[in-house]
Image (cartoon, grey):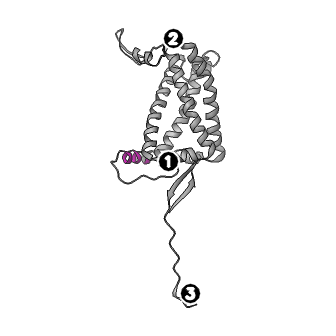
Amino acid sequence: MKVIKEKHPLIMRWTHWINFPVLTIMIWSGMLIYWANDVYSVTIFGHTFVRFFPEWFYSALHIPQRLAEGMAFHFLFMWFFVLNGFFYVLYSIISGEWRYLLPNKHSFREAWLVLLHDLHIRKTAPPQGKYNAAQRIAYTAIIIMGFGSVITGLAIYKPVQFYYLAWICGGYHLARIWHFVLTIGYVFFFLIHIIQVILAGWNNFRAVISGFEVVEEQPKPAIETSSDDEKA
């Protein structure tokens, strides 16, 4: 028997969907800023073999010569990113949703089972609650990454005023590297997340939009009456 069950609260869904376009704009505008000082490359004995982004990549996305535009978008949508993340974490704490999100002592072992199941190496599905072990680890990691992006971003933006943040990050240059690595992490998370959504199917995707999912429940067995009851 199919029944409809509530899965995702409204605020969790709103913050999820708001975060996607905001983070996309942050990554795009960050690339406009990065182009102005494209320093990351593979250089040996003064000869550059590989730059992180080739020239055709910048030209195809019309990135060159747009530093001021990139900074304007980046600093504007930074506030949406911070506020959206703040409301998400605050609601998770107040509502108790954090209990479903935080990994437990079994999560890392079960996450390996999730990976084996997704690769069709293991047939038996791993334990599945509201979120499986791999999702718990990934969603907790993305919150930590968001916090790290804010800290490193402020350290890069105002290294003198926020000198203590720059010191925590290991200095301005290391803060910029951490900020760049976190951005790459978001891109990989997006790709893996989209693939997982496709593999999970329509029912799971619908739950993130409507907040409800359709689940199959076994009907409860009828209670058998005893012979004494029948005689009565």
- Residue 52, given in percent of the width and then of the height, sits at 41, 19
Crowdedness near tag 2: few (<14), some (14–19) or many (≥20) residues, C-alpha within 10 Å:
few
Amino acid, disc 1: Asn
In the rendered image, the residue lying farthest to the bottom is 231
The residue lying toward the viewer, choosing from 130 and 60, is 60
Tag 3 and tag 2, C-beta contact below 8 Å: no
Mark 3 or 2, nearer chain start: 2
For the image, the number of numbered tags is: 3
Mark 1 or 2, nearer chain start: 2
Q: Is residue 181 above or below residue 107?
A: above
**Residue at image point 52% right, 69% down:** 220
Crowdedness near tag 3: few (<14), some (14–19) or many (≥20) residues, C-alpha within 10 Å:
few
What residue is shown with label 2?
65
> Per the image, is 114 magenta?
yes
Q: Is residue 118 above or below residue 232?
A: above
**Residue at image point 62% right, 44% down:** 10
What residue is shown with label 3?
229
**Residue at image point 65% right, 17% down:** 161
Q: Which mark is residue 204?
A: 1
In this view of the protein, can residue 65 be seen by the observer? Answer: yes
Quadrant that contains the C terminus = bottom right
How far apart are the alpha carbons under marks 3 and 1?
46 Å
In the rendered image, the residue lying farthest to the right is 94
